[in-house]
Image: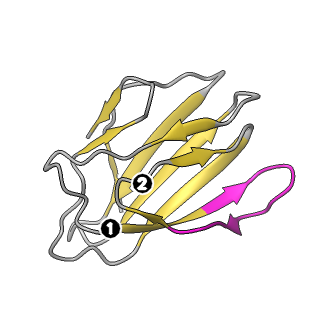
Amino acid sequence: MVRVELTGPQDVNGLMASAYGDASGRRQVLVFVNCAPTPKEIQLRFKSGKDGGATYTPYVTSAEKNLGAAEKIVGSKKFTVPARCVMTLVSENIAGRGAPPLLELKNEPSINN
C-alpha cells in the first residue's frame, strides 16, 4: 500500500482524511478521523460518475468500539462518520473497476487524489 496524496479539508478540530491504495488498484483503504463532537456525513464521488459497485467495510474505533465492523458501504451511498472516532474503510476486490480518482465529502470541500 502507498499513500495517495489528498487535498481538501484537514481540520484538526473536525474531519481529516487520508487514503491508501495498492499498485494493482484492487484494494483501497480510506481513513477518516473525526475530532468534532458531532457526526459528519460523507459521500464518495467518483470522477467517472459511476461507482462501479465498489464495496467498503467500515471499522470504527471510538470510546465505545474497538475496530467494530459496521454496515458495508456500497459505491457512492452516503454514510456517517460518528463523532470523536476513527473510521477505516477497507475496499473489497475492485479489480477491473479501478480506484476512484476523486473523493468528495458532502458539505465540505473536495478531496482529490
Q: Position of residue 41 (x, y in %)?
A: 55, 38
Q: Position of residue 4 (x, y in %)?
A: 31, 46
**For the magenta stretch, what is the residue range?**
59-72
Q: Which mark is residue 80?
A: none
Residue 24 placement: quadrant: bottom left
- Give the labeled residue for mark 2: 77
Residue that appears at 19% across and 56% down: 50
Q: Secondary structure at mark 1?
A: loop
Secondary structure mainly formed by the magenta segment: loop
Q: Determine whether, in the image, residue 85 is placed left or right of residue 109.
A: right
State the image coordinates of residue 98 (x, y, percent, origin top left).
18, 64
- In three-dimensional space, the C-alpha distance between marks 2 and 1, rounded to whole angstroms, equals 11 Å
Q: Is residue 81 magenta?
A: no
Question: Residue 38 is drawn in which quadrant?
Answer: top right
Per the image, the residue denoted by label 1 is: 54
Q: Residue at x 61, y 52 (%)?
A: 87
Q: Is residue 10 above or below residue 22?
A: above
Report the amino acid beneath label 2.
Lys
Q: Amino acid at mark 1?
A: Ala
Residue at 24 percent of width and 53 percent of height: 100
Q: Residues within 10 Å of mark 2 (few under 14, many from 20)?
A: few
Task: Single out the mark in the foreground, 2 or 1.
Answer: 2
Q: How many marks?
A: 2
Check the image and report above or below for 95 versus 40. Answer: below
The image quadrant of residue 52 is bottom left
Answer with mark 2 or mark 1, whichever residue precedes in sequence.
1
Residue furthest front as drawn: 77
Q: Which color scheme is applied? A: secondary structure
Q: Is residue 99 above or below residue 41?
A: below
Give the residue at the far right of this rendering.
Answer: 64
Depth check, front residue: 85 or 40: 40
Q: Position of residue 94 (x, y in %)?
A: 27, 73
